[in-house]
Image (cartoon, helix red, strand yellow):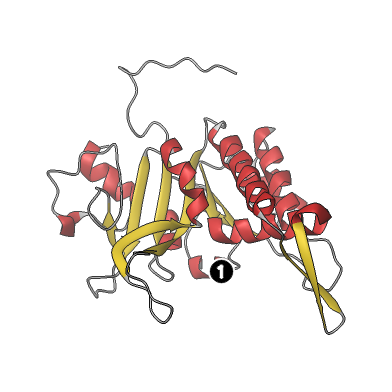
Amino acid sequence: MITAETAETATAFDRLTLILAGAEKSGKSRLAATARKPILFNDHDKRFSALAGIKDVYGLTYMDSSAPGIMPTAFNDQLTVLTLLEQGKTLKFIGEQYGKKDWPDVRPRTVVIDSMASLSAHIMAYNLYSNKAIRRGIVIGGRELFFPGGWDAWNADSASAYSIVMRLIAMKDLDVILIFHEDNEVDETRSTEDKKAFTGKKNLFPARYQQFNKYFNEVWRVSRELGGLVPTIQVSPDFRFMASSNLDFSKIKLTEITPNIAEMILKVTGK
């Protein structure tokens, strides 16, 4: 498929493709909920309740059965929802498939994956269950647990996640937000068996998913490092994190970059 576009008449925010990274409880999910609405949250963290009270945000929470021997379904469920979106289905149609009959009969404007680490866990659980060749098993208390048996398991995970992200990006009428946890970069030359030395840099977690950086125009870091109740948003690169943005924030003070996606765009573009 080929899409024709003209750069001169386009703006950086005709469509938003955004990676939000940060430590746990830094405010990533609530920031994503300030994007263009209505928003469809694909909740793999089982924390949709953290968005309680926010208008025009609709969530699908994915869970695998904890019962022994039952096939994990969350990964396939995510693929099913992607197919419905590709078919042009509305929030009403999607909600009805999962017992919600009061969702509006409109397309979502923004689709969020929260978080990529938990999506990875669901992908891995399904892949290991389905393919003996990439797993090893351990029986504990009569229950068999599966673990990656080599690089093929990790490669299968990366390939599966890549397919999901590329399918999302291909739907041009949707803004796409991926939420990542962050990880501290380790200086292997200084680490010891007892304590690792950190470089101060922050990377996306899982590290193998850094391949997605190049497909997203906006890569922001969310943190509470300044000690305030309101998180700060890093939109330009420094020694800690390779953030990036197509927006020109150079004329805005750091204190004016509020944790609200719509307001941030308004401050820079005036619309």
Q: Position of residue 237 (x, y in %)?
A: 25, 48
Q: Quadrant of the C terminus?
A: top left
Residue at 63%, 53% in the rendered image: 154
* Rendered view: 2 above or below 201: above
Q: Quadrant of the N terminus?
A: top right
The residue carrying pointer 1 sits among few (fewer than 14), some (14 to 19) or many (20 or more) residues within 10 Å by Cα, namely: few
Q: Position of residue 153 (x, y in %)?
A: 68, 53
Q: Secondary structure at mark 1?
A: loop
| Residue to which mark 1 is pinned | 47
* Along the line of sight, the residue nearer the viewer: 21 or 48: 21
Report the residue that reaches farthest toward the bottom.
141
Whether residue 176 is visible here, answered yes or no, is yes
Residue 250 image-quadrant placement:
top left
Whether residue 231 is visible here, answered yes or no, is no
* Along the line of sight, the residue nearer the viewer: 81 or 154: 154
Q: Give the amino acid type for the residue marked by disc 1 in the picture.
A: Arg
* Along the line of sight, the residue nearer the viewer: 259 or 133: 133
* Rendered view: 226 above or below 93: below
Q: Give the number of marks.
A: 1
Q: Position of residue 245 (x, y in %)?
A: 29, 41
Residue 18 image-quadrant placement:
top left
Residue at 39%, 65% in the rendered image: 27
Q: Position of residue 35 (x, y in %)?
A: 42, 49
Residue 170 image-quadrant placement:
top right
